[in-house]
Amino acid sequence: MAKAYLVGSGIAALAAATFLIRDGGFDGADIHLFEEQRTIGGNGNTGAAATVGHPLLGGRMLESEFRYAHDLLSGIPALDGPLMPVVREAPAGREDLPVGGIARLVDGDGKIVDTRSTGFSERDRLELVRCLATPEGHLDGKRISDSFGEHFFTTNFWFLWCTTFAFQPWHSAIEFRRCLRRFLPLLAEYAALPGVHHARCNRYDSIVRPLTAWLREQGVTVRTGAHVTDLGFAPGHRSTRVERIHLSRSGRDEQIEVGPDDLVLVTNGSIDDAVSLGSHHCAPPARAHRSDAWLLWHRVSRGREDFGDPAAFDKHVKESRCESFTVTTRDSAFLDALERIGGGETGRGGPMTLTASNWLLTITAPRGPVHQDQPEGVSVWWGYALHPGRAGDHTPKPMTMCSGREILDEVLHHLAFDETVADRVRATSTVIPCLVPYATSQLLARRRDDRPKVVPEGSVNLAFIGPFSDVPDDVAGTVEHSVRTAWTAVARLLGLGEHPPAVLNGRHHPRVLAAAWETVHRR
């Protein structure tokens, strides 16, 4: 029987293992996952006791037309009930999960910004239309700022779009164009984004844990602490047949011989690499570590243009880093005060961006549990900053150097709560900051061939999966993209007749175009 070796254990690898069993007829015992960390699923598993805090790296969006993730998860049982598929636990079945709301943007005076207006000038509109119409090849290597003037980055549209998808002006114009075209059907209600959902809990509890439990039941082998250091290819110029896997485990070097019918699926690169957690009293420590996902990609791509260029994504940490923070409390004072500002029930309003913040802070405060084991009476809300390297408005130093307590002070400064309420929030909150150096690395300016194809030309047993493998027209970094790369890899390597559905794209529908045109012309 053929065997499959998967490097990494993020959502893409877990999805690939599932498709190998479901569509490829593999026995679970013939599938092996190698993960360098002690836990699987990337760095999503950062849970801690309620007395310490419940750290959360961030969210992963699931759109209403999440066809690939729906197909993957529809047959996976949730952990809290064998009859409930996890797909209902994630985006469906609850009316309060759509992102958006009344107070999506709040200005420096604490006033809600009217997001019915894009804030566009005539030049902004023309530049947006031109970006949408420009062939992707003409944007090769360009940044978003190469296509737009300075005013565009001060508009309501930009604040909404960049804090929803984590774009920066220096990010890839190719990726920005793909995102615009991909989510054009949502543009008419871009403040509320009714077609975008978040999982009921965090991504680890809602997606990773159920998938992992199901795969283990099927007999899939997961080796943690296993560092895949290199791949050995068959002789021949530009050969793509993997014959050996070199790995290190518990300080011992191993070599696995790959048979002629075996498959090797590699997660190249890592968004969650070098993540570091701080505490309520300490800033996150800076880490220079790079995971095997990056190092392996550098080794196998040396001298090969068809395997992409990892240096385009892992050499620009100052341009890709973000910082998130998680606040755990047994007091509802913060949520209650936020509702009074937002004018609606917290948890239905989605993210709130503080536009005057030098860090560009965005906070999300759900009423429901964020962690599956969250104790009764404990609330968790979280936020993130796209400019953590800048000095704060209240705290005169970069966010990267701030403790959780100092970050909370900065948030409270911008929200301008009553001082009695603010003191109560400080006294009852535990804040854990989390520095993510490669958080937006998949969005960095790049050329079209910097990310490899899922299955390189001529490959018979090697595929690249995850956010750094390329799917034409799709946006990297979403759950959908990761699942699609896994599905594509399995379907093509096994020669299956059924391939993933085409990337959803409503930009050619007359009603979508008409609604988008009306939106960008709102005053």
Image: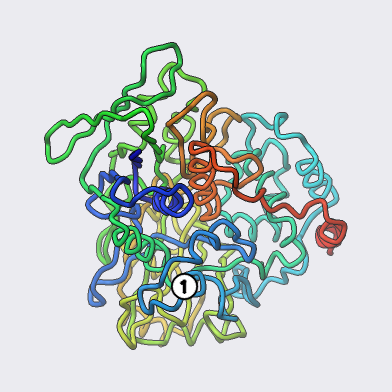
Q: Is residue 47 above or below residue 419?
A: above
Give the residue furthest to the front.
1
Q: Amino acid at mark 1?
A: Pro
Q: Residue at x 34, y 61 (%)?
A: 433
Residue 312 placed where, x, y %? 49, 31
Give the residue furthest to the left.
251
Q: Is residue 287 left or right of residue 201?
A: left
Q: Residue at x 68, y 71 (%)?
A: 113
Looking at the rendered structure, the secondary structure element under dot 1 is: strand
Q: Is residue 299 above or below residue 9?
A: above
Q: Is residue 193 left or right of residue 223?
A: right
- State how many labels appear: 1
Return the residue nearer the eye: 327 or 467. Answer: 467
Return the residue nearer the eye: 482 or 392. Answer: 482
Q: Residue at x 42, y 46 (%)?
A: 271
Return the residue nearer the eye: 184 or 502. Answer: 502
Q: Quadrant of the C terminus?
A: bottom right
Q: Residue at x 41, y 55 (%)?
A: 323
Residue 342 placed where, x, y %? 59, 80
Which residue is the site of mark 1?
A: 85
Q: How is the image coloured?
A: rainbow
Residue 300 placed where, x, y %? 38, 25
Task: Tell me the quarter of the picture where residue 287 sits.
Answer: top left
Q: Is residue 23 above or below residue 372?
A: above
